[in-house]
Image (cartoon, grey):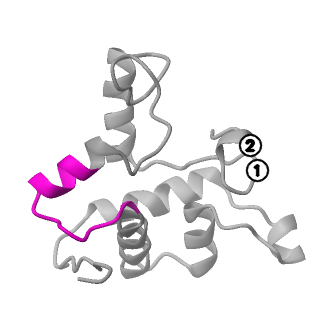
Amino acid sequence: MIPPEAFKTKRPHVVILNDAAWSIVEAQRRLNPIWGFPFHGRRINTMNNNGWQRARREAGLRSFRVHDLRHTFACRLRAAGVSAEDREALLGHANHSMAGHYASADVGRLLKQANLILDRSGTRTVLRVANG
């Protein structure tokens, strides 16, 4: 759960993690139960920091942005056949329709949808790189 003060739209947001992402978070919790991915024992306030820039350079992804990870997740969900409505829920998009408001997504179903991207057999990933 991301509290409203930490989320761009200032509303609480539940993040659905697939099994792979959840295992990474759980491993990190064993190292630091308060902050999932701390730096020198303190929380990280921004993703586009020196650590990200260094990791990106070392991976040879010169023009790769943090937001490109979100784009890749969305593309993989679509390729796995996840509906537009469920993709919006998984990506945290605000739902502006009354039908969507009253028919909120089932967390169990969303978890199954997020896990669909773990089977990468027969797929190819093309990274979208801005200005590259």
Q: Residue at x 21, y 76 (%)?
A: 125
Closer to us: 123 or 2: 2
Indicate the quadrant containing the N terminus: top left, top right, bottom left or bottom right: top right
Mark number, residue 10: 1
Q: Residue at x 29, y 80 (%)?
A: 128
At label 1, the amino acid type is Lys
Q: Residue at x 29, y 44 (%)?
A: 50
Closer to us: 35 or 51: 51
Q: Position of residue 51 (x, y in %)?
A: 27, 41
Measure how far apart labels 1 and 2 are at the Cα level: 4 Å
Indicate the quadrant containing the C terminus: top left, top right, bottom left or bottom right: bottom left
As drawn, 10 above or below 109: above
Q: Residue at x 38, y 16 (%)?
A: 41
User: Would residue 111 be found to the left or right of residue 105 on screen?
Assistant: left
Label 2: element kind: helix
Per the image, the residue denoted by label 2 is 4
Residue 87 is covered by the magenta coloring: no
Q: Which residues are magenta?
A: 53-66
State yes or no: discs 1 and 2 in contact (Cβ < 8 Å): yes
